[in-house]
């Protein structure tokens, strides 16, 4: 089989596995994303071995999660996010501190020295916005207050996690911490987000006409996608997750008059590309590393601590929303997804983690990603999908000329 | 800059370059594809050097051309193709024989020995369906007889080119030719195409309901995309170009009731991915290899022969359509695009070509791809876009329930 055939076959297997997984999950009343991750685990090296995760697949997965967060941003108005700013900050900070403390305590008790224990603890911290966002989008509840708090907290979470990773990485060298450098990184990140959130949205609000200046009738879509890729690059360059940039690009684009057309045009694009992200995430579970009782025991403890840390930390931060909403927010922060996997990979590369610690953290990241979606689905079932604000309603009806009739497509 | 940032930056540059190139070309009244290829040449290693063509970019390019031919197939009815079968066969055969003879003659006169000259000649043969198809789609003339003849001939062309490549590769070893083996390959290829064209279309015609069986409302799209990838893999496995499989998948899907919805859903997907194919094609021009007068002279002769061979060969085959149509068909067969590039790469790997011969054949492939589209555009300007048949009209109006109102999006 020549190389092109092999690559195309890989794409075909991943795509079909995603469709079958999603279908089975939905028939079992679970979110499609759970089926896609499980399908990835099954076709991946640790069960069937049909898929080797090569760089092209990784890149498709990255494009998938970038587009996913862009589309989530497109459904988020900056005004709505501002309203939840205080609660989101509380959730983000508490949801970082508690898991870090719990993770660090476990690592110290397991015999890691202090610098290494701090690294392990860092892997407990970051929330994967991608997985929760997809579940919220599937359920159609992105407009609820809880969803906005989760998304806002995920941004704060990501900034703190990035700083923490900087600190723990510096600690490994034994050189102590360069406070000036860290503050510089923090200032850059906060500055970038503030500039896009404040000026980016204002500029886009006034640029709706500009989006249609080029000859191609698809120019609003292609310009928005270019903006999405551009801000993803910028965020990644500043050491933030690329998806934060994509989310901000989506939020800025949400201020244009073409937002509804763009939302519709993104649906088929996402149907093709987003599944690659979830299947590739699933293929990374290496079940054989977890084949002994002590590893399983450790995994159970780590997962429990990871869940409790976010549930209690995030939930406490959101207590002002009421107990059920606080629970929803807490659960929404549980999935570690690709962020946990990235920290684990860094730890392995830096020689901080053994193969087993690595496998445990990867497995914890995935288990938290698999258990949270059905729980969220159950909690949100039967609750109203929407809490539209006055601003929303006024602006949404202002551009009916651009609205194309809504087909029943959903978001999967 | 870390690896993720670098990869995302590459995607961003390619995508933005494509948009700017397409915009400039369209303002100059040229097809967008010319601008995209030129943009690729400019951002590529031989001018600005902003882009290294890595495997992920190659794979995105491959997905792009596969989706492009799928969407072209979706606009092609098997019944219409049958009507042009005789002419398309003539065009395909004559359009292979004449360029092969001319290319071989040039190679022999340039001092290549006979086996190597045959390999060079093979690079003159294959037509790139991708580039012509995109131009015809941009102009909205896929329903004209000339377009159908070109697409039919491109399939026949590809089968013959594949056989020829088998022959010339065998000749390099000096072992003579295994006729049985070649006939086997031919039988497989013809069998595959016939089975899909005859049974695939019939099965799809009766399966419109099945496409909607899964839970997801997007299932007709995802199932069609899976079919597209699956047949692309199958074609590639049989030694045909993957795009032939994608084209057949599109043609089979064109028989379903959902074809119009699918056509509309493919538009935004293609806007994202297809430009990668044309920009990546453009990056492969290495201008520095052509920096001396003798190379430029050889390039001019080779390009002239390549153009004349297809123009006269293809045109003669289509003479029964009238002179202007024959000219359109002849020009439509001129672009060598990625197929010429593939043969050149094989020649380089097999040690048959020098760096200069390689650069000349790559440049010829690209020049033919750049000059044919504007010529096609000029010849087709002002001609009626459509020659609908009775069958077409009857079936097209049968599924208005599934039609979503046509927005002015075009196909770029």
Image: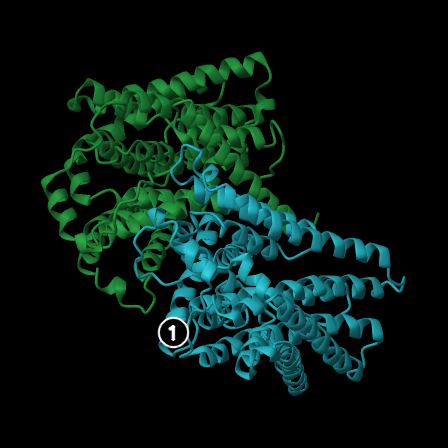
Chain colours: A green, B cyan
Quadrant location of the C terminus of chain B? bottom left
* Residue A171, image x, y percentages: 43, 33
Residue B76 placement, left or right of A157: right
Residue B89 placement, left or right of A101: right
* Residue A244, image x, y percentages: 33, 44
* Residue A108, image x, y percentages: 44, 18
Whether residue A117 appears in this view of the structure is: yes
Task: Name the residue nearer the viewer: B173 or B335.
Answer: B335
Task: Name the residue nearer the viewer: A2 or B11.
Answer: A2
Query: What secondary structure is marked by label 1?
Result: helix
* Residue A233, image x, y percentages: 39, 52
Task: Name the residue nearer the viewer: A130 or B126.
Answer: B126
Residue name at image x 27 percent, y 50 percent: A192
Instruction: Using the image, name the chain to which the residue with label 1 belongs.
Output: B
Whether residue A115 appears in this view of the structure is: no
Q: Is residue B249 above or below residue B300?
A: above
Write down the quadrant of residue A295 in the picture. top right
Say which residue label 1 marks. Answer: B26
Residue name at image x 61 percent, y 27 percent: A47
Count every numbered label the image shows and give the total: 1
Residue A386 placement, left or right of A154: left
Q: Tell me if mark 1 has few (under 14), some (14-19) or many (20+) residues whose alpha carbon lies within 10 angstroms of its own.
A: some
């Amino acid at each position: 089989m020549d190389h092109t055939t092999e690559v195309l076959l890989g794409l075909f297997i991943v795509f079909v596995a995603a469709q079958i997984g999603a279908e089975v999950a939905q028939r079992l009343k679970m979110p499609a994303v759970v089926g896609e991750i499980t399908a990835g685990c099954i076709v991946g090296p640790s069960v069937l071995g049909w898929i080797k995760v090569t760089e092209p697949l990784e890149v498709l997965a990255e494009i998938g999660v970038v587009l996913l967060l862009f589309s989530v941003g497109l459904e988020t108005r900056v005004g709505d996010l501002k309203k939840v700013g205080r609660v989101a900050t509380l959730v983000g900070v508490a949801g970082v501190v508690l898991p870090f403390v719990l993770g660090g305590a476990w690592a110290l008790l397991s015999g890691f020295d202090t610098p290494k224990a701090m690294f392990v603890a860092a892997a407990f911290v970051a929330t994967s916005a991608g997985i929760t966002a997809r579940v919220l989008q599937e359920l159609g509840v992105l407009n609820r207050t809880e969803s906005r708090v989760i998304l806002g907290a995920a941004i704060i979470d990501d900034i703190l996690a990035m700083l923490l990773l900087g600190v723990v990485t510096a600690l490994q060298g034994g050189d102590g911490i360069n406070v000036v450098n860290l503050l510089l990184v923090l200032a850059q990140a906060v500055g970038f987000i503030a500039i896009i959130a404040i000026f980016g949205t204002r500029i886009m609000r006034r640029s709706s006409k500009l989006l249609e200046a080029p000859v191609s009738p698809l120019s609003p879509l292609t310009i928005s996608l270019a903006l999405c890729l551009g801000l993803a690059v910028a965020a990644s360059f500043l050491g933030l997750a690329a998806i934060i940039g994509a989310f901000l690009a989506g939020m800025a684009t949400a201020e244009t008059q073409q937002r509804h057309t763009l939302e519709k045009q993104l649906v088929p694009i996402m149907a093709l590309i987003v599944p690659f992200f979830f299947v590739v995430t699933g293929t990374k579970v290496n079940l054989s590393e977890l084949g002994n009782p002590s590893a399983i025991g450790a995994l159970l403890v780590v997962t429990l601590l990871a869940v409790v840390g976010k549930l209690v930390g995030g939930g406490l931060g959101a207590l002002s929303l009421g107990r059920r909403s606080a629970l929803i927010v807490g659960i929404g922060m549980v999935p570690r997804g690709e962020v946990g996997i990235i920290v684990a990979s860094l730890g392995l590369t830096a020689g901080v983690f053994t193969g087993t610690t690595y496998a445990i953290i990867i497995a914890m990241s995935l288990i938290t990603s698999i258990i949270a979606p059905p729980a969220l689905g159950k909690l949100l079932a039967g609750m109203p999908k929407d809490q539209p604000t006055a601003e929303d309603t006024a602006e949404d009806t202002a551009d009916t000329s651009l609205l194309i009739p809504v087909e029943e497509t959903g978001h999967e």
